[in-house]
């Protein structure tokens, strides 16, 4: 699948508004401080797929599209996402993201902490401009949940006995919660009914869970040239994800592996060859198939929520977005 | 002056509400995550003087006191203040604050980053509960300004040529801006007129500037047993503050000192004796007198704003608070 072509097609109906979000983002991220602007511009240069913006705008299309407020909300979501990436990179001591140097790699941890804080503060200011109390609450609760998810991730790092249940709690709070806030916020600002708001919340949440499972699969199956970070990155960071949990559950195959995996999770300086050995073990296992199956289950839940809306070309796009998220290869 | 006795007297009229703020704070800071609760409880154990709460509540007393909303706003201000202290301690690599170990000293930088983020997110949630758009804007703009002030402080660290003008820009953004938001927020939530809102903003801003100048003086004149951190702490952190700027301006006295000061600001590992030599040089200079004079000037500006309000016992308290801030010895 050609990622860029697929996304261009899916996002065609909101592309001009997505471009507008970029413009607004740059306006709001600007400050009187030179270093802040340099760091902002750098962080903006590797913007990822802008999935959160698309999700917010496309969800708004199912009812009465209110571009002014939807654009602001999208900027806030992209900005809070960027803030968490910047702080995550400091916490993970990551020097690259998608092949580009991180803010902490270029300017150090201190500037990174402050830049993340600044973005968090700025998002509150953007949300305040929307002047909708439901959005105020949604946004504040979302950011707190993302923080809790990140703390849970950190507290469970290195735990070879991480359960499937805790894994899902972690990704729901850290990642899927923001996806859910995008589609729910899009619904709120387009005058959707309470029932529709809840349905779009469910759509985003399940889509987000599927998205993260795929991310965690790709960390084992893709190489640096495609995903922009070395395969097995999660393992090196002590992160236990679904493919590894499933691989370890296969007693016969996992026999004798536990010690090696635990050493890796503990951050032992093992030779690259040995890391790649564990990566191929996980990626050649039925574990990947099972993880993919889980992603598809959540994709189906997202689809179920969507099918309560009448058929429309906009609904079709959101439907195809599920397929994209699951079948993407980066 | 007996600090505790003075504050007890000044805060007597709002003491029960201040206690209520503590209760609410603990409620809002609680989470399902054990580590977060431990860190929160630790951070709360050294609460400082609760000046921000008192300022918010006392300002609200000049008009129609609305305890429900004022309490929430106070909790948000204390929480954002705590968030910035936690991140500041990481940035400054500080291991103690007021004689107690910092969050980063006990749990490391990573937990500290996340705990600060969590508090920032929680404050947005508390502000959202107030459901007043003016407060939304005030709060968001304040937090962004505090971040900008902190970044400016960091960017100018180690600069022996820091101007008085930049010093004031820094303390206005980093510290005084939050004081201004307290008194302004108190005014807004008590139904003050636009003119009164601006006057109380001016009161808080000038009080905050005076407060920070005194803090910077105390860093030179007090010892660890009183202020809870070693004298000359700012110097060790590369922070150029008003007493040092004034001391350096006296060409005769500063002659030959520049090199030594610059080395200290650069973080050179000089013997403690040499640090204390610079500290006594600054603290025995006319520089302290001049700095105190500046604090008094700003105190007078705060008083001027206050005198536009009719005389009342509540106005007298705010007036005496200025004297307290300037004459405090810790």
Image: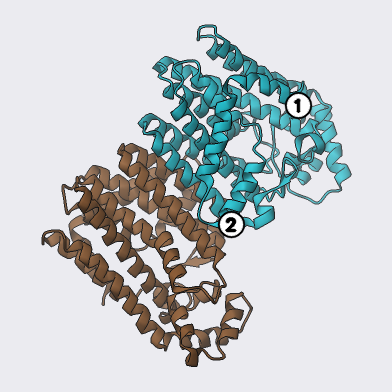
Chain colours: A cyan, B brown
Q: State which quarter of the image contains the C terminus of chain B.
A: bottom left
Position in image of residue B150 (x %, y %) = 49, 60
Q: Which mark is residue B291?
A: none
Relative to A36, is B223 on the left or the right? left
Give me the chain letter of mark 1. Answer: A
Which of these two is toward me, A55 or B279? A55
Q: Indicate the secondary structure of the residue bearing disc 1.
A: loop
Position in image of residue B261 (x %, y %) = 56, 82
Residue B298 picture quarter: bottom left
Q: State which quarter of the image contains the N terminus of chain B.
A: bottom left
Report the residue at 48% width, 91% height from top. Answer: B253
Report the residue at 65% width, 51% height from top. Answer: A103
| Rendered position, B20 above or below A225 | below
- Residue B74 visible in the picture: yes
Q: Which mark is residue A329?
A: 1
Question: Which residue carries the number 2 mark?
Answer: A35
> Within 10 Å of the Cα at label 2, are there few (<14), some (14-19), or many (20+) other Cα atoms?
some
């Amino acid at each position: 699948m050609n990622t860029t072509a697929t996304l261009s097609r899916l996002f065609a109906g909101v592309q001009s508004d997505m471009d507008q979000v970029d413009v607004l983002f740059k306006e709001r991220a600007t400050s009187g401080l030179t270093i802040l602007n340099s760091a902002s511009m750098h962080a903006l240069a590797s913007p990822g797929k802008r999935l959160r913006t698309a999700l917010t705008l496309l969800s708004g299309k199912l009812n009465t599209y209110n571009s002014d407020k939807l654009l602001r909300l999208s900027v806030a979501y992209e900005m809070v996402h960027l803030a968490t990436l910047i702080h995550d990179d400091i916490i993970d001591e990551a020097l690259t993201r998608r092949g580009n140097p991180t803010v902490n790699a270029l300017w150090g941890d201190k500037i990174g902490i402050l830049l993340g804080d600044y973005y968090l503060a700025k998002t509150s200011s953007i949300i305040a401009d929307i002047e909708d109390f439901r959005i105020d609450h949604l946004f504040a609760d979302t950011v707190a949940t993302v923080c809790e998810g990140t703390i849970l991730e950190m507290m469970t790092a290195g735990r070879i006995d991480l359960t499937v249940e805790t894994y899902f709690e972690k990704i729901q709070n850290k990642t899927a919660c923001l996806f859910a806030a995008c589609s729910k916020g899009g619904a709120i600002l387009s005058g959707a009914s309470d029932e529709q708001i809840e349905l779009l919340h469910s759509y985003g949440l399940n889509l987000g869970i599927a998205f993260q499972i795929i991310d965690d699969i790709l960390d084992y199956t893709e190489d640096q040239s495609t995903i922009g970070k070395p395969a097995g990155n999660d393992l090196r960071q002590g992160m236990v994800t679904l493919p590894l949990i499933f691989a370890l559950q296969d007693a016969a195959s996992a026999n004798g592996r536990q010690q090696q995996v635990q050493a890796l999770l503990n951050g032992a300086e093992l030779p690259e060859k040995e890391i790649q050995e564990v990566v191929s073990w996980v990626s050649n296992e039925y574990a990947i198939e099972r993880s993919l199956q889980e992603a598809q289950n959540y994709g189906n839940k997202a689809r179920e929520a969507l099918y309560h809306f009448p058929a429309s070309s906009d609904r079709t796009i959101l439907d195809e977005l599920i397929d994209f998220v699951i079948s993407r290869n980066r």
